[in-house]
Image (cartoon, rainbow, N blue to C red):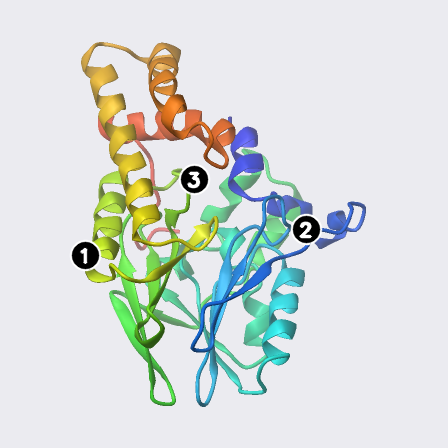
C-alpha cells in the first residue's frame, strides 16, 4: 500500500529525482496563468515532474513565491520565469505545508536571497515525515534527498502579514491537510493560494488529513473569499463553486463511510461499498483510481480514532 501511495501521492514520485527525468521525454514543468495585478499561478499538468502547483506575486519592491515544487529543476524554471518578468528581489517564499512536492525547490530561492517561511510544524516535519513517501525501506539516496530539503528559516504559529512595498499579503494558518498548512491571500487581486487544503476536481492525498478540519477550512474560503480565484495545490485555478464541490466530496466521503461503519461493514466490504457510492459522482475526477481507496481507508481510520498523523513538535 505504501508503495502504491508513493506513486500516487507525489506526482510523479520525488524518488525519481532530476537524473531520472533525463531518460524520459521532456514534459513541461508548469503552465503560467496570469491572474492580473502581478499575480501568477504555475499550474503543474498531470505527470509533470514539478509535482504540484506553485505561484508568485510581484510587488512594488519585491516578489513573494508560494511553494517550490518537488524538483529543484522546476523551481529553477519558475525562477527564470520570474526573472523574465521583473528584476525585483525575491524576498519571501511561503511553503503551504511540508510535503516534498511543495518544498523541494526551497534552496533555489533561498540562494536567490529569499527568506523561506512556513507554519512552525513544517520545519519540524520536513526532513522526517517526508521519508514515509518512499515506503518502509527508503534507499540511501532517498534518505539523503529528504535530509537535504531546504528548511524554512522563519516560522509562525497562526500566520503572518507580509508587505511588498505597499502591497499587503496575508498568510493564514488553517487546519486540515497536514496540521501545518498555510493559505496565502492577495487581497487586492482577489486571489487565494490554498495549498492542498483545496484540490480542484481532483481526489486528494489524505494521508495526514483531518477531514473535519479540512471541511471547515474550505467553509472559511467560501465565507471569507466568495469572489476569489482559488489556486489549489493540484488542479486548475477555481472559483467558489469548485471549492464547494471539493468540500462536498469530503462531506460525502465521511457520510458514506460512517453509514457503512454503522451497518457493521469493515475492510474490503466497507471500501467497495463506499467506492460504489462515490464512483457515479466523482469517478471522472483526477486521480480517482489512485486515491479513492486510500481516501476511504484513511478516513475510516480517522472516524474510528485510530488514524496516525504527525504530532506538532514531534519530528
Q: Give the foreground label among 1 and 3.
A: 1
Instruction: Tell me the residue at 68%/55% (across/down).
Output: 28
The picture quadrant where one finds residue 215 is top left
Between residue 209 and residue 287, name the one nearer to us.
287
Q: Is residue 130 above or below residue 39?
A: above
Q: Mark 2 = which residue?
A: 17
Q: Which numbered disc covers residue 205?
A: 3
Which of the two discs, 3 and 2, sits closer to the camera? 3
Give the structural element (helix, strand or loop) at label 2: helix
Asked which secondary structure carries label 1, the reply is helix
Residue at 35%, 69% (x, y): give it.
155
At x 24%, y 34%, the residue is: 251
Q: CA distance from mark 1 to mark 3?
A: 24 Å
Q: Are marks 1 and 3 in contact (CB under 8 Å)?
A: no
Which of the marked residues, 1 or 3, is nearer the chain's N terminus? 3
How many residues crowd mark 1 within 10 Å: few (<14), some (14–19), many (20+)?
few
Amino acid at each position: 500500500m505504501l508503495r502504491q501511495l508513493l506513486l500516487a501521492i507525489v506526482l510523479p514520485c520525488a524518488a525519481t529525482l532530476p537524473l531520472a527525468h533525463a531518460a524520459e521525454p521532456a514534459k513541461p514543468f508548469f503552465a503560467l496563468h496570469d491572474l492580473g495585478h502581478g499575480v501568477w499561478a504555475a499550474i503543474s499538468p498531470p505527470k509533470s515532474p514539478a509535482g504540484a502547483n506553485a505561484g508568485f506575486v510581484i510587488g512594488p519592491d519585491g516578489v513573494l513565491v508560494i511553494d517550490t515544487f518537488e524538483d529543484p529543476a522546476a523551481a529553477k524554471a519558475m525562477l527564470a520565469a520570474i526573472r523574465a518578468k521583473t528584476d525585483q528581489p525575491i524576498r519571501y517564499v511561503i511553503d503551504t505545508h511540508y510535503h516534498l512536492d511543495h518544498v523541494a525547490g526551497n534552496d533555489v530561492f533561498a540562494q536567490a536571497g529569499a527568506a523561506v517561511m512556513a507554519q512552525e510544524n513544517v520545519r519540524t516535519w520536513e526532513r522526517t515525515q517526508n521519508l514515509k513517501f518512499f515506503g518502509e525501506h527508503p534507499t540511501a539516496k532517498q534518505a539523503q534527498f529528504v535530509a537535504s530539503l531546504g528548511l524554512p528559516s522563519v516560522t509562525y504559529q497562526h500566520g503572518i502579514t507580509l508587505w511588498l512595498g505597499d502591497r499587503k499579503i496575508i498568510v493564514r494558518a488553517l487546519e486540515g491537510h497536514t496540521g501545518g498548512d498555510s493559505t496565502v491571500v492577495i487581497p487586492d487581486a482577489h486571489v487565494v493560494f490554498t495549498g492542498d487544503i483545496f484540490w480542484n476536481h481532483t481526489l486528494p492525498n489524505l494521508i495526514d488529513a483531518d477531514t473535519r478540519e479540512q471541511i471547515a477550512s474550505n467553509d472559511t474560503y467560501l465565507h471569507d473569499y466568495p469572489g476569489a480565484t482559488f489556486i489549489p495545490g493540484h488542479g486548475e485555478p477555481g472559483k467558489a463553486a469548485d471549492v464547494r464541490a471539493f468540500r462536498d466530496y469530503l462531506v460525502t466521503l465521511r457520510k458514506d463511510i460512517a453509514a457503512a461503519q454503522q451497518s457493521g461493514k469493515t475492510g474490503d466490504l466497507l471500501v467497495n461499498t463506499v467506492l460504489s457510492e462515490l464512483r457515479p459522482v466523482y469517478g471522472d475526477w483526477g486521480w480517482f483510481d489512485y486515491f479513492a481507496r486510500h481516501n476511504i481507508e484513511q478516513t475510516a481510520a480517522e472516524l474510528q480514532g485510530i488514524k496516525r498523523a504527525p504530532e506538532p513538535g514531534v519530528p
